[in-house]
Amino acid sequence: MAVAHKLKPKPRSRRKTFHATMLVTRAEQWWVEADSVEEAQALLASGEGNHSALGECVSVELEGMLDGTS
């Protein structure tokens, strides 16, 4: 004679939230008006110029994890 036993469901572990610092590199299109290539490069390097469009993400690197326990 076989006896049926009721199986108890396995308790689900509570998921945790983890935060991370990510370094994301993206190629963007910029333009600037200048009299020479050198002037244009200097202007762009100093943050001058006009932003044309967002580019695609070209690299993602995990920089660090925070788990909330420290």
Image (spheres, rainbow, N blue to C red):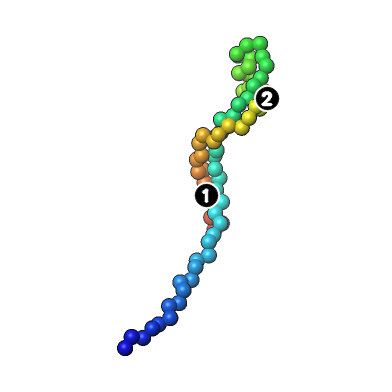
Answer few, some or many: residues within 10 Å of disc 1's Cα (few below 14, many 20 plus, some between 14 and 19). few
**SS assignment at label 1:** strand
Q: Which mark is residue 6?
A: none
Answer few, some or many: residues within 10 Å of disc 2's Cα (few below 14, many 20 plus, some between 14 and 19). few
Residue 33 occupies which quadrant of the picture?
Answer: top right
Nearer to us of marks 2 and 1 is 2
Tell me what residue is drawn at x 55 percent, y 34 percent: 56
- Position of residue 66 relative to residue 2, above or below, is above
Name the residue at the front extreme.
Answer: 1
Residue 50 occupies which quadrant of the picture?
Answer: top right
Number of numbered discs overlaid on the protein picture: 2
**Percent x, y for residue 51?**
66, 27
Give the alpha-carbon distance from disc 2 to disc 1, as whole Å.
35 Å
Mark 2 and mark 1 lie on one chain; the one further toward the N terminus is 2
Tell me what residue is drawn at x 40 percent, y 82 percent: 5
Q: Which mark is residue 50?
A: 2
The quarter of the rendered structure image containing the C terminus is bottom right
Residue 28 occupies which quadrant of the picture?
Answer: top right
- Position of residue 68 relative to residue 36, above or below, is below
**Percent x, y for residue 6?**
43, 81
What residue does disc 1 label?
A: 65
Name the residue at the bottom extreme.
Answer: 1
**Percent x, y for residue 18?**
54, 54
**SS assignment at label 2:** strand
Does 67 sit left or right of 4 as displayed? right
Amino acid of disc 1: Met
The quarter of the rendered structure image containing the N terminus is bottom left
**Percent x, y for residue 57?**
54, 36
Does 35 sit left or right of 14 as displayed? right
